[in-house]
Image (tube, helix red, strand yellow):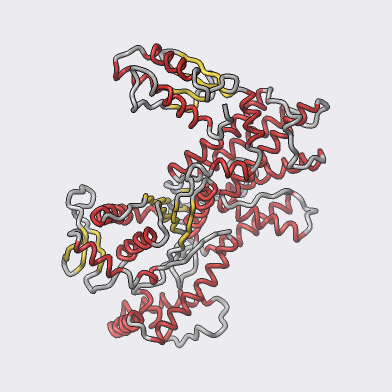
Amino acid sequence: MDIWFHPAKELERLLEKAAATLPGFDGTFDAKLRPADPRFGDFQANGVLALAKSKKANPRALGEKLVEALRADRDFDESLVQVSIAGPGFINFALTPKFLHAWLLKFSGAKELEKAASKFYDGKKIVIDYPSPNTAKQMHVGHLRPMVIGEAINRLVRFCGGDVICDNHIGDWGTNFGILIYGIKSQKYDLDAEHENPLEDLERMYKAGSAEVKNSAEAADKAREELVKLQNGDPENTALWRKITEISKVEFDKIYKIMSLTCDVTLGESFYRDKVGRIYDELTSCGMAEEDQGALVVFFRDDERFKNQPFIIRKKDGASNYASTDLATVLYRTEHFGAKEIIYVTDGRQQDHFKQLFMTVGKWFGAKGYPLPDLRHVWFGTILGPDGKAIKTKSGEPIRLRELINEAVSRAKKIVLEKSPETPADEAQAIAETVGIAALKYADLSQNRTGDYLFSWDKLLAFDGNTAPYLLYAAARIHSIFRKASVPLDTDFSSEASAPETEQELALAKKLVALPSVFEMTLAELRPHYLCTYLYELAGLFSSFYNANKVIVDDAAVRARRLMLCARTLGVLETGLRLLSIEPLKKM
């Protein structure tokens, strides 16, 4: 029997394979394998109970037949995995110390883990849409969540075998550019001159222009004229628009670098402005789109939720909108990139839009015979301030993301110097930058993404509890063990290390072997907090192991196995942190 990377999945497969050979079972048998109560083993299969009920059979008898067939399978070795039946037909499995030892030897580092995990997606082409900010606006705290959630999903999907393209679908086209260009011209702002914060200037001019347009019909007409000129390719306005996009990109890239984002392409809304005509034609010819009050819309008359809420794909003035370009985007990603799955990372307020988008794409692609990719909306809640409302400055404005990052680093540096006053200034700054930014990321990722969460500096920078500083310290602590022992981290323990024996050794080893199940659960719902919770629990189990089991002992076999447990724990902690876009530290 081979040493499985994902024992739960393989046991489920073997049970269903065995069931297919037995009378009384059928091809629809579901083993229903779940984590077990630790008193009975590591996994429990309850599928025979449901089958027995439907067949009006004895579940215990069916379970015994299934276990007998399983034991006869050459791919099953009871010296590695013990099997037993309990109660009315629960089938329990326990991984033996021999299996745990072999797993730790086989999956010894990030490369081995990634190679094994790659079977989850097995090269599937996936496009992930994030962080997708609007140009001509400074990033604020609301951009934190799509950045960190999107990047974590990107890294995890790549690690698990996805052939990923990250598309930064920026908002770089629309009616707001008419107002902005009007503001630039009316205030005689020189985009080519040196400015301290040009993006802030653009935002200020847009706000001033918007106020003017609201209060003046003449200003509104001039803004519309500037928009029409831009849409018709006027050289002057096109040059201004390109400069606005360039200024935005420079500022965005600074934030992306700080936050370690890895976008592959940036295809904004402007890229699709010459591609929406095909969308109108095809949806109309398919009988899906129709005119309604001058606009082109798609109705969902049979859908209870949207029967009175049409999906507007072209506005009554003939202009495209988010729906138009999002439809064109799906088509382009499918035809050009060969996407088999498209993941959108946005806030929860856009749920209705994406539900209608996905319904429209499903009907349209079906009618045209186009291959339909899996479409997934990864939505998230709001970051709350102390008052329980969306976090803002005292003046009621959104907190600038750069200011939030700077404060995180400043607060982290203060804590570093309080704990280690002798730390050299440059080293303290480097540690503070890692810890501060990691704390911002982890505070977000450790929350269930669909919930709101309360922002707290004290909580996210704490060195205890489920926080980035705690995990970074746990990893750095293991590095110190190897430094003190003068043992290289990449030592081959296969010749000396014995199988885990003590209660804490076994608990830690089993937690390490649980990593594939955590990957599977996280990927199924694209909720990074599952991985965060696992890493926190792993760090806690390591602490219990280390407190109860002396690592550097005279017995070579015991010393080697405990050092191996330290090394494997560190490897999984650091791999997990990097998947969350957090760079570990060797020393804190």
Across and down, in percent, residue 288 comes to 20, 58
Across and down, in percent, residue 130 comes to 46, 59
Q: Within the image, what quadrant is residue 283 found in? A: bottom left
Front-most of 480 and 333? 333
Left or right of residue 265: residue 409: right
Q: Within the image, what quadrant is residue 59 found in? A: top left
Across and down, in percent, residue 527 comes to 47, 45
Left or right of residue 342: residue 252: right
Residue 172 in view (yes/no): yes
Front-most of 493 and 197? 493
Residue 37 sits above or below residue 470 on the image: above
Residue 396 in view (yes/no): no
Residue 239 sits above or below residue 552 on the image: below
Name which residue lies at 57% across and 53% down.
Answer: 440
Across and down, in percent, residue 11 comes to 49, 27
| Quadrant of the image containing the N terminus | top right
Front-most of 424 and 388? 424
How many marks the image carries: the answer is 0
